[in-house]
Image: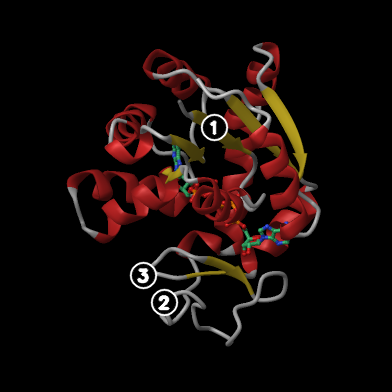
Amino acid sequence: MSRRLVFLGPPGAGKGTQAQAIGRKLGLAHISTGDLLRKEVADCSPLGREAKVFMDRGELVPDAVVVRMVKARISEPDCAAGFILDGFPRTRAQAIALEAETHVSRVFFFDVADSALVKRLSGRRSCPRCGASYHVEFVPPKKAGICDLCGSTLVQRDDDKEETVMRRLVEYTAKTADLIGYYRDRGILTSVDAFAPPEQVEHSLIAAIRKVPEA
Ligand code: AP5
């Protein structure tokens, strides 16, 4: 019995922040395609070298590459108890490939005004060691620049530079926003007010997830 969830929304909507916290609290594996790709880049693998070209430009990595990676990840043992997909699917082709692989229990759409996104992304800081995410103003670590969880020095993501952020937002509108209607038509979309403070978003999401039947 498990819940297989998708967190859908624009860059900076808070998908990663919530997936990490809720995954831990509800015992669901957190699968971030962005994190998986950044690991491949850091390892200088062939996949990482191919993906880096697209990521640096703020463009989507080709579907075939990402689908292969996700298929392998969701078949790992920790996903048997359920998982949260964060940042996947991002195109209709990815959504169709996911459906062929597994049953999606529910898709949560992170609804947030565009005006908030650039500020959230430019202030984001991440831990290179454990992946925890912060914001210099909205979600500050206890000690400036240091990860609360593992004590590592926080870094800014390369693709959080303003011109790359703008490109990512364009990609989202052109290729990903269509999935809102796609999942609404299938009757499995829930919109979440992601403009609210993080604790409030988490509270609403957990309440909504608990209502999703396990299958
Ligand atoms: P990815 O890493 O997935 O980036 P993204 O989707 O652009 O999402 P972000 O990580 O930027 O935002 P988020 O919604 O997780 O927000 P967060 O919680 O961090 O992808 C990177 C790249 O990889 C892509 O550009 C693409 O090239 C490639 N890629 C990945 N997946 C792919 C796919 N499926 N197909 C093809 N290519 C793919 O929050 C942002 C900031 O806001 C943080 O600082 C946080 O502390 C703060 N914050 C969070 N919630 C709140 C709140 N409620 N109020 C105020 N601040 C908040």
The front one of 52 and 90 is: 90
Tag 2–tag 3 contact (CB < 8 Å): yes
Query: Which circle marks residue 5 in the picture?
Result: 1
Q: Amino acid at mark 2?
A: Cys
| Disc 2 target residue | 150
Residue at 63% across, 67% down: 122
Q: Nearer the viewer, mark 2 or mark 3?
A: 2
- Callout count: 3
The front one of 5 and 114 is: 5
Residue at 52% across, 20% down: 92
Residue at 57% across, 29% down: 175
Q: Amino acid at mark 3?
A: Arg
- Local crowd size for mark 3, using a 10 Å CA cut-off: few (<14), some (14–19), many (≥20): few
Q: Residue furthest bottom?
A: 143
The front one of 25 and 21 is: 25
* Spot occupied by residue 158 in the image (x, y as percentages of width and height): 46, 64
State the SS at label 2: loop
Instruction: Say left or right for 7 vs 184.
Output: left
* Spot occupied by residue 190 in the image (x, y as percentages of width and height): 72, 29
State the SS at label 1: strand
The vertical placement of 190 against 154, above or below, is above
Query: Which circle marks residue 129 in the picture?
Result: 3
Q: CA distance from mark 2 to mark 1?
A: 28 Å
